[in-house]
Image (cartoon, grey):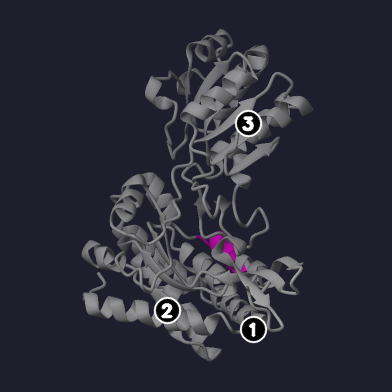
Amino acid sequence: MLTLDNQQLTSQAKASREASRLLATISRETKDRVLTDLAREIDGSHAAILEANQADMTAAAGLEPAKLRRLELTSQSLARLSAGLLQVAKLPDPIGTVTVARRMPNGLNVTKVRSPLGVVAMIYEARPAVTLDAFSLCLKSGNACILKGGKESIRSSSLLAQLAHRVLHRNGLPLSILTSLCGLPREGLEHLLTLDTYIDLVIPRGGTPLIEFVCGHTRIPVVKHYHGICHIYIDQRADITQAIAICLDSKTTAPAACNAAECILIHEGAAAAVVPALVAALVERGVEVRGCKQTLTLARQQSAGAAGLVAASPEDFGREFLDLTVAMRVVKDLDEAIAHIGEFGSDHTDVILTRDEASSAAFVARVASSCTLVNASTRFNDGFELGLGAEIGISTSRVHAYGPMGLEELTTQRYVVRGEGQVRN
C-alpha cells in the first residue's frame, strides 16, 4: 500500500503541473523518441512484467473472474501494448494544429489551435496496461498524467511506470510527467480529488461504485467511462452466416471487456432461421443464452443449445454480464429494436447487421451510441482498432469526448489572435 500524506500528494500534483508546462513545449521528435524507446523496454522486459503480473494474479485470486481477466497480462497483450506505443508515435502531433483560421474585416488574424489540457488524473481498477496506454497518449498530447491504479495491480502497474520513468530519465525529461500512485488508499484519493488547482481532468475507469465515488468527491471536471451494455440487432435482411460469426466474436473473444456484446436482438422475420443456429453456436462456445419466450420456443423446436439456454428475467435486459452470458430477444421490427436499445443501452457500442441500406442508415441516425457499427463486431470500438494507437478509455459522456479517447480527445482548443495594433473602439 502506498503511504503519502496530504502534503506529499499536493507536492506531487504541483510537480505534475510544472511538468505539464514544460511538456507543452517539447518537440514531436522528443515525444516520439520516448515512445519508441519505451516500446523497446517493454519488448525486452516481458519476463519481468509477466512475473510481476503473476504475483498480482496470485494475490488477487479471490476477485471475481471478470476483474481477474482484466488484470491478467500475457505475451500477446504485451506485444499489443508495445505496438500501440509505436502506433501513437507515428500519429500526427495534435498540439498546435490549427482548426479554424479567419481574417476579420479589421485585419485581425484569428486562429483556433489545439492545446494540452494540462494534468490528467486517471483512476482505474485492474487493467495494468492502462498505465502505459494513458502515459503514451498524455505524453503525445502534451499532458502530464497522475495514474492511480488499484492495489490488485500494484506490482504490474508499478513496474510499467518504472519502465516509463527509466525512458524519461534517459531522454532528460522530468519523471513528474508521469506520477504513479498505484495502491493509494481511499483517504489519499479523496485528497487528490480536491486538488483542482493542479489537476485539469479526472477520468475514472472501472465499476459503477468507483465512478460514483469520484464524481461525489471532486470539483474537477470528470469524463465518465460507464458500463458497456452493447447490443447487436440482426435485421430481417442480414447475412445469417456473417451475423453468427459477428455475434460469436462480439461475445466470446473478450467477454469481460466493456465492448463485448451483452444483448442480441433479432427481427421476427429472420428469427426462425437465425435463432436455432445462433443459440447452438453460442452454447457450443460456452455461452449461456438467456432468451425471451419466442427465443426459447424457436431454439427448442430444433433442440438447439438446450444445455445452455435458459429463460431470461426482466433484469437480464440492460445488464452488463462481463462473462460468457448473453441476453437474446426477438423483436417485431427495427423500430422495436431501437426502442429497446434506447431503454436498456448505455450509449457505448451498438451494431446493426443488415444488407439493407435504408435500415442501416436509420439505425445509425437514431442510435447515437459512442460507436455505432454496421456489419461489424462490437469489439472494434477500441482505440487501437480505430487507429488511435491506444485509448485512455471509452467515454460515455457526451461533453468534450465521446467514444474512445485518443490524442485529440486529450486536447482543448483555444484562440490565438494576431494583430497589427488594432484597438476596439
From this view, report whether residue 274 is shown above or below residue 342: above
For disc 1, the marked residue is: 27
Q: CA distance from mark 3 to mark 2?
A: 42 Å
- Of the image marks 3 and 2, the number of the one nearer the N terminus: 2
Check residue 81 for magenta coloring: yes
Q: Is residue 77 magenta?
A: yes
Q: Main secondary structure of the magenta part?
A: helix
Identify the residue under disc 2.
17
Task: Decide: few, some or many residues near mark 3? Use Cα within 10 Å; few <14, some 14-19, many ≥20.
Answer: some
Q: Disc 3 residue type?
A: Arg
* Span colored in magenta: 74-82
The answer to whether 315 is drawn above or below residue 27 in the figure is above
Horizontal side, residue 122 vs residue 401: left or right:
left
- Residue occupying the point 29% across, 76% down: 9
Among numbered discs 2 and 1, the one appearing first in the sequence: 2
- Asked if 183 appears above or below 404 in the picture, the reply is below
Q: Nearer the viewer, residue 65 or 231?
A: 231
Q: Helix or strand or loop: what does disc 1 sit on?
A: loop
Give the amino acid at mark 2.
Arg
